[in-house]
Image (cartoon, rainbow, N blue to C red):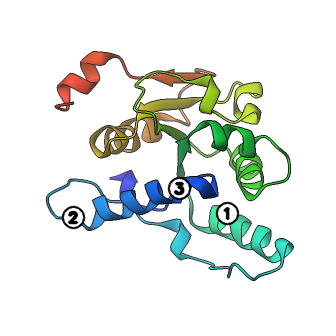
């Protein structure tokens, strides 16, 4: 299953608790959710120089990531498009490397929320799928959408209809 191999979670630093929650889902044997955490590779210390951190982020994405979960928030949208932040650097690399992106809406929305998707992804009409921040639907997206990403010619953001959520018990 593709979700077990090199998933990169991109997020604004303010949303790090949700990243930790995803790691807790992975550790909980009662939750069917797993991913290879690309953040555990090529570590950079908080005290590292800016260019060192950017280089490490590039190494993580180039050498380990086959897919991305982007934690969707207004702060993430702002930072992901500001041209300066580390999240903006990650978004640029995602576009450069043509990586599949699952946007996990932290507000629980199951639809496309353009107010949480960084502008560079929207401007590029990048093929993404938006889901609510729930383990089952993120897993579903990583198992399904990601495997068809390269074959699909659909551009722009997409989302799953309510029957997909019902089918997986949400």
Mark 1: few/some/many CA within 10 Å (<14, 14-19, 20+): some
**Residue 45 percent across, percent down from the top left:** 67, 82
> In the rendered view of the protein, which quadrant contains the C terminus?
top left
Residue 26 as seen in the image, left or right of residue 6? left
- The image quadrant that residue 108 belongs to is top left
Q: Which residue is mark 1?
A: 62
- Nearest to viewer (mark 2 / mark 1): 2
- Cα distance in 3D space between marks 3 and 2: 18 Å
Choose the circle earlier in sequence order: 2 or 1.
Answer: 2
Choose the circle earlier in sequence order: 1 or 3.
Answer: 3
Query: Tags 2 and 1 in contact by the CB under 8 Å rule?
Result: no
**Residue 151 percent across, percent down from the top left:** 53, 31
Choose the circle earlier in sequence order: 3 or 2.
Answer: 3
- Cα distance in 3D space between marks 1 and 3: 14 Å
Q: As drawn, which residue projects farthest toward the front?
A: 14
**Which mark is on residue 9?**
3
Residue 39 as seen in the image, left or right of residue 62? left
Badge 3 marks a residue whose secondary structure is strand
Query: Tags 3 and 2 in contact by the CB under 8 Å rule?
Result: no
Q: Which residue is mark 2?
A: 28
């Amino acid at each position: 299953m593709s979700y077990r191999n090199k998933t990169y979670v991109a997020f604004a630093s303010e949303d790090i608790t949700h990243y930790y929650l995803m790691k807790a889902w992975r550790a909980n044997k009662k939750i069917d959710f797993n991913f290879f955490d690309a953040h555990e590779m090529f570590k950079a210390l908080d005290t590292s120089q800016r260019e060192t951190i950017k280089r490490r982020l590039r190494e993580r994405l180039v050498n380990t990531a086959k897919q991305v979960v982007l934690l969707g928030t207004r702060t993430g949208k702002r930072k992901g498009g500001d041209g300066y932040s580390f999240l903006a650097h990650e978004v640029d690399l995602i576009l450069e490397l043509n990586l599949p992106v699952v946007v996990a809406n932290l507000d629980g929305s199951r639809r496309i929320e353009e107010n949480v998707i960084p502008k560079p992804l929207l401007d590029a009409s990048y093929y993404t799928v938006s889901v609510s921040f729930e383990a089952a639907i993120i897993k579903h997206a990583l198992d399904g959408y990601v495997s068809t990403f390269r074959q699909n010619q659909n551009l722009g953001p997409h989302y799953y209809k309510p029957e997909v959520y019902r089918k997986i018990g949400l």
